[in-house]
Image (tube, rainbow, N blue to C red):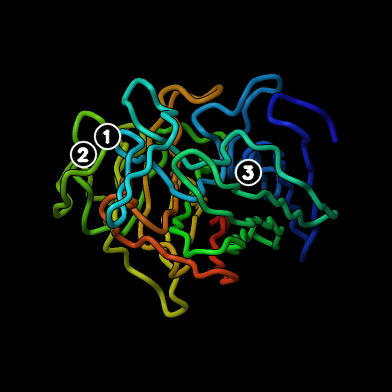
Amino acid sequence: MSFDPTGRQVFLHASHDGRVVSAQISQVGASLRHLTVDGVDVVPSFPAGIPAPGASGIVLVPWPNRVRGGTWTVGDTTYQLAITEPALDNASHGLLRFTAYDVADGPESVTLRADVFPQTGYPFHLQTSVTYALVADGIVVTHAIRNVGTSPAPVALGTHPYLAVGDAPASEITVTSSGTTYFVVDDKLVPTGSAAVTPENDLRAGQVLADLVLDTAYTGLSRDASGRASHTLRDTAGRTVTLWQDESFDYVQLYTARPYADRDVSIAVEPMTAPANAFNTGEAVRWLAPDEDWQAQWGITYAAS
């Protein structure tokens, strides 16, 4: 382990069926900082000595994305969260983005734990954990949340990994995702409604990454027989990187960053259990009873052809 503005660094390594998988996890934000399969970058890294750029790989809890004005209301009670996105006057990316998690690691997996304590705008107490486990073709990520408070607690969850296909340039990568509906947003990037995908943001047949300009949430995802929804990057050599999400995650945010670390453009594929501003709309927010547990899972796989 070494030290960094993102805290302790955990390095995982596994060899399965002749394939070698490695990952770097950062303590702050429980971030998936780097992932390789057979030496191919699947999650691109960023330089040491800086905070995670663009929320790289962090866990978003107890809400993903944004809460408009940091204000939300339940019944007759209005709560005011700290404004963490001053440019847009929003509370953004939950309450653990800059938290140093407790770390329990082994050679092929690591579990990071942190509490969301009662605080301004969120008077609830959650125990959270995230486990990163290497598998033969990538990584499986399992989130667990437990309400240890005395009243029901509203919870939503997301994560913020960036994906790559080795050193393939964005002009040679096609992005495919099955969402049929996207969220229309205002100048604060908060949803005002939803609509059917348009030619510009419809990714069902695939679009070239270099041509995409996205900060867009989708739903209406197609799922396979196991209940997983998937999003795939494919390069011209036929290599694929796929992020899958289980049935807890009904939404995905796709965000193109220009630049990202040493790349001209990169894409974040962000599984979410609820859309932006869900604390106000109530959409897909899960209310955990005292002592209730909740788990959700996603992962990333790589195939050479």
Q: Disc 1 or disc 3, which is closer to the eye? A: 1
Element under disc 1: loop
Q: Quadrant of residue 80?
A: top left
| Left/right of residue 39 with respect to residue 10 in the rendered view | left
- Label 3 crowd bin: few (<14), some (14–19), many (20+), radius 10 Å: many
Residue 128 place in picture, x, y as percent:
63, 56
Q: Residue at x 35, y 57 (%)?
A: 251
User: Mark 1 highlights which residue?
Assistant: 189
User: Mark 3 highlights which residue?
Assistant: 32
Residue 134 place in picture, x, y as percent:
71, 58
Q: Is residue 125 above or below residue 286?
A: above
Q: Give the Cα distance between marks 3 and 2.
A: 28 Å
Q: Quadrant of the N terminus?
A: top right
Task: Return the disc, 1 or 3, that comes first in the chain's sequence.
Answer: 3
Q: Residue at x 72, y 51 (%)?
A: 112
Task: Return the disc, 3 or 2, that comes first in the chain's sequence.
Answer: 3
Q: Is residue 85 above or below residue 176?
A: above
Residue type, numbered disc 2: Val
Query: Contact (CB < 8 A) between labels 1 and 2?
Result: yes
Q: Can I make out residue 75 in this image?
A: yes
